[in-house]
Image (tube, rainbow, N blue to C red):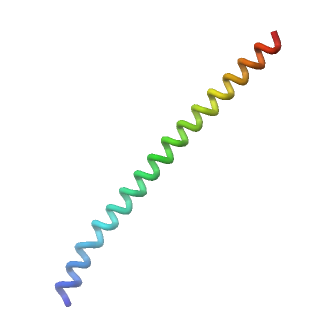
Amino acid sequence: MRRNRLKNKQKQPCNKKKATLNLSRVASVNQTILIIGVFTVQFVLASFQVALEARHT
């Protein structure tokens, strides 16, 4: 029984490490998507502004 308990204690940290690794991977993916989204919005706004200026002149 004591041996089993030791094995379980050794197994847990690895699982925790894997979980945090997955979380950080998801966070980095979300960050990339967010950055791409911001650039897309800026591009759309810039093109819209150019179109408005072209219409005024």
As drawn, 6 above or below 34: below
As drawn, 19 above or below 27: below
As drawn, 11 above or below 34: below
Seen as rendered, the residue at the extreme bottom is 1
| x and y percentages locating residue 32 in the rendered image | 48, 41
Q: Quadrant of residue 10?
A: bottom left
Seen as rendered, the residue at the extreme left is 3
| x and y percentages locating residue 34 in the rendered image | 55, 42
| x and y percentages locating residue 38 in the rendered image | 59, 36
| x and y percentages locating residue 47 in the rendered image | 68, 22
Please indicate whether residue 43 sits to the left or right of residue 10 in the image.
right
Residue closer to the observer: 24 or 33: 33
Residue at the spot x=54%, y=36% of the render? 36
Residue at the spot x=38%, y=59% of the render? 20
Location of the C terminus (image quadrant)? top right
Q: Quadrant of residue 46?
A: top right
Residue at the spot x=46%, y=51% of the render? 27
Q: Quadrant of residue 51?
A: top right
Residue at the spot x=20%, y=80% of the render? 6
Please indicate whether residue 36 sits to the left or right of residue 52 in the image.
left
Seen as rendered, the residue at the extreme top is 57
Location of the N terminus (image quadrant)? bottom left
